[in-house]
Amino acid sequence: MSEDVIRLVQDAIACSRKWSETGWSVIFGGRNVEVSSLKQTQALPKNVVFRPEALNYWNKAKLTGNDAADSGQKALDALKNGNLAAADNALYFCQYIEKPFAESSKTWQPLYAAYKEELAGH
């Protein structure tokens, strides 16, 4: 497998582990307040009505990102060992894990598409 794909997987693992830190635009509450990371959520006053919802969202993003990164690491190990079937399975699973956040996170679905393109070219 090309070094480019291996680098993409490494980058995706690092990105995925930081989803809750780097974040993305998410709107909460009746007043449509943007809270774009776990750190921003934790800084909200305790009496903010939507704080529990935002905490739940960003904690879920953190856990999901770590789960996807763990599967990505399996894919990376498989790629380095030339086991393309295991790599494909792990990368496919990364997409599945990412689904609840895919529209915002944009990490594993584009990578899987690039991976499949690379395979088709060989």
Image (tube, rainbow, N blue to C red):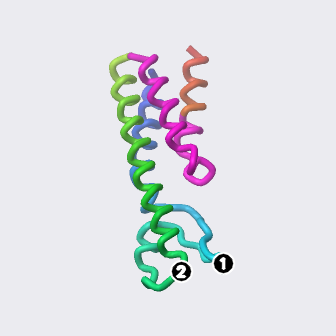
- Residue occupying the point 55% across, 62% down: 24
Image quarter (top left, top right, bottom left or bottom right) of the C terminus:
top right
For marks 1 and 2, the one nearer the N-term is: 1
> What residue did someone put label 1 on?
30
Residue 40, position in %: x, y? 46, 74
Q: Is residue 106 magenta?
A: yes
Q: Is residue 107 magenta?
A: yes
Residue 53, position in %: x, y? 52, 68
* Prevailing SS of the magenta stretch: helix
Please identify the quarter of the rendering in which residue 118 is found. Answer: top right
Q: CA gap, disc 1 to disc 2?
A: 9 Å
Q: Which residues are magenta?
A: 83-111
The residue nearer to you, when weighing 89 against 81, is 89
> What residue did someone put label 2 on?
49
- 112 up-or-down from 69: above or below: above
Q: Hey, which residue is sitting farthest right in the picture?
A: 31
Contact? badges 1 and 2 (CB < 8 Å): yes
- Residue occupying the point 47% across, 72% down: 52
- 10 up-or-down from 53: above or below: above
Residue 99, position in %: x, y? 57, 44
